[in-house]
Image (cartoon, rainbow, N blue to C red):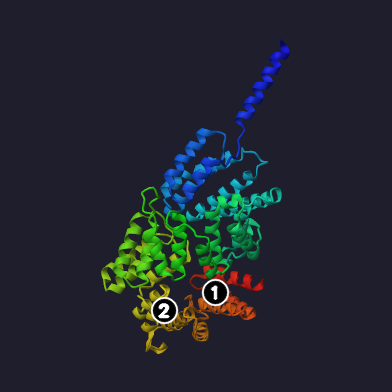
Amino acid sequence: MAKRYIASVVFLFFSVVLKAEKVYEFNSTCQQAYQEIIKLKINNGIALIEKAKQQNPNNLIPIFLENYVDLVSLFFNEDAAEYAIKKPRLNERIKLLEEGQQNSPFYRYCLSTVYVQKAFIEIKFAENWRASWDIRKAYILVKDNKKLFPTFAPNDLIYGSLQTVIATIPSGYSFFANLVGLSGTMDEGMTLLRNIAYSNDPYAKLFSSESALTYCYLAYHIANKKADVFNFIQSRKLDLVNNHLMAYMAANLAITDKRIDMSRSIILDRNKSTEYYNLPIWDYEMAFIKLYHLETQEAASYYEGYLARFKGNFYVKDTYLKLSWCYYLEGNTKAAEAARQNILKKGSTDTDADKQALKDAKSGVWPNIALLKARMLSDGGYYQEALNMLTGKTGNSFTTDADKLEYQYRLGRIYDDLGKNDEAIRYYTVAITLGLNSKEYYAARAALQVGEIYERESKKKLAIDFFEKCLSMKNHEYKNSLDQKAKAGIERCGN
């Protein structure tokens, strides 16, 4: 009798333990939920997460996926009130994920992913020290996971991206690199990202949209493989209609690469179903498409629509600057001044672009119209129209030193984009000489561009010289972002 009682107690004990064991089961319901979230069909994803919880309350993957939902909302909307509510949940999820099976490759992977996502959110809300510690935790976790589970493909998504970014942190954020005590190489990081982006591994395929997003952004902005990025988008046949995250990524990069027609088509052709998360970011992108072709009235309408819905601070000052330019180019002085006043009152100075917008607003000086129009047209890829704006002018056509400097830089940039390297270098060199000690960014950017021209021509030593020249210039606008590009250029040429 006693033996039977003891056996029953032991059986009951192990039954409770087994029942309470937390697992990482990326089953078909979770996979479907993940895909819906990545497409930005958020409500569908939430419903599937709840279904997965009911199927197995001890499965931790639904907890992991909930973090993606909060990331999308907080990253794109930057609503401080929403963050105050959701911030405790981020830490609660980490504690829950730590209860899982440590012998699963998903244990450290999920934790490292959540720490990275948490850091992205913290940066948006100016919590940079917290973000740096979370990046450190993510790095250590995924590095350990690579040692324990070397064939687990998703490791390379996190590890590769951290390696790439850490290798190119600009001096303005050196506290970040020193704090986390990490090191990385861009070449190794990009190799890992490219491999997982092209991999046929089942888990790599599951995370294919996420790896495509990461690979494309870092390959474009850091590895400077711009043509490769658009070849990748086309050859991999990314769904730019029904996957809104892929559509946003491709449209955003197309604008940056001055492929305005491509970006416009992507935005207008995307699936307009109400199932998709309604983001104000589409108005923001369309505003640039219009502005860069000097369709200022429509651009102003899109900027106003975006600002009315966006809750955050990143690029708000810069957006008001662009809005002020729209009205300024229309000759609407009153509206232009009102927009400029909002630069002083709204948003933050966490980005280089916002710092520059605040500086412009405080100066009380409006841009030279010919230079501003040439800049907008050039940024939109309308190079001949931009060149026409400056035809017949010389440096002496402008009264201020800043305008004389911009004129040289602007011509250099237009000829650069037209593929006329010798003319571009000639104008860039003048800009470097004129602006070597200037607080305007033109000289530093000119040095960076010359470095990239020589890099394309495989003149690596000359390229490094100009990248280092860019780094050597102090106290100019866009210092952090230009330094990061210059550091990445030195990494590329050094390898």
Residue 319 sits in which quadrant?
bottom left
> Of helix, strand and loop, which one carries label 1?
loop
- Residue 288 horizontal/vertical position (percent): 38, 67
Residue that protrudes farthest toward the top in the picture: 1
Return the disc, 1 or 2, that comes first in the chain's sequence: 2
Q: Is residue 33 above or below residue 223?
A: above
Q: Residues under labels 1 and 2: Cα distance? A: 30 Å
Instruction: List the residue tagged with mark 1.
Output: 474
Query: Does the rendering let one see residue 161?
Result: no
Residue drawn at x 66%, y 41% as measured from the top left: 102
Left or right of 138? Residue 399 is left
Residue that protrudes farthest toward the right in the picture: 3
Residue 336 sits in which quadrant?
bottom left
Q: Pick whichever, 144 or 95, lies toward us.
A: 144
Left or right of 327? Residue 102 is right
Instruction: List the residue tagged with mark 2.
Output: 383
- Residue 262 horizontal/vertical position (percent): 42, 67
Q: Nearer the viewer, mark 1 or mark 2?
A: 2
> Of helix, strand and loop, which one carries label 2?
helix
- Residue 483 horizontal/vertical position (percent): 56, 70
Query: Does the rendering let one see residue 10?
Result: yes
Q: Pick whichever, 487 or 37, lies toward us.
A: 37
Residue drawn at x 65%, y 23% as measured from the top left: 13
Three-letter code for the amino acid on which mark 2 is drawn: Tyr
The quarter of the image holding the N terminus is top right
Three-letter code for the amino acid on which mark 1 is drawn: Lys
Label 2 neighbourhood size at 10 Å, few (<14), some (14-19), many (20+)? many
- Residue 312 horizontal/vertical position (percent): 41, 55
The quarter of the image holding the C terminus is bottom right
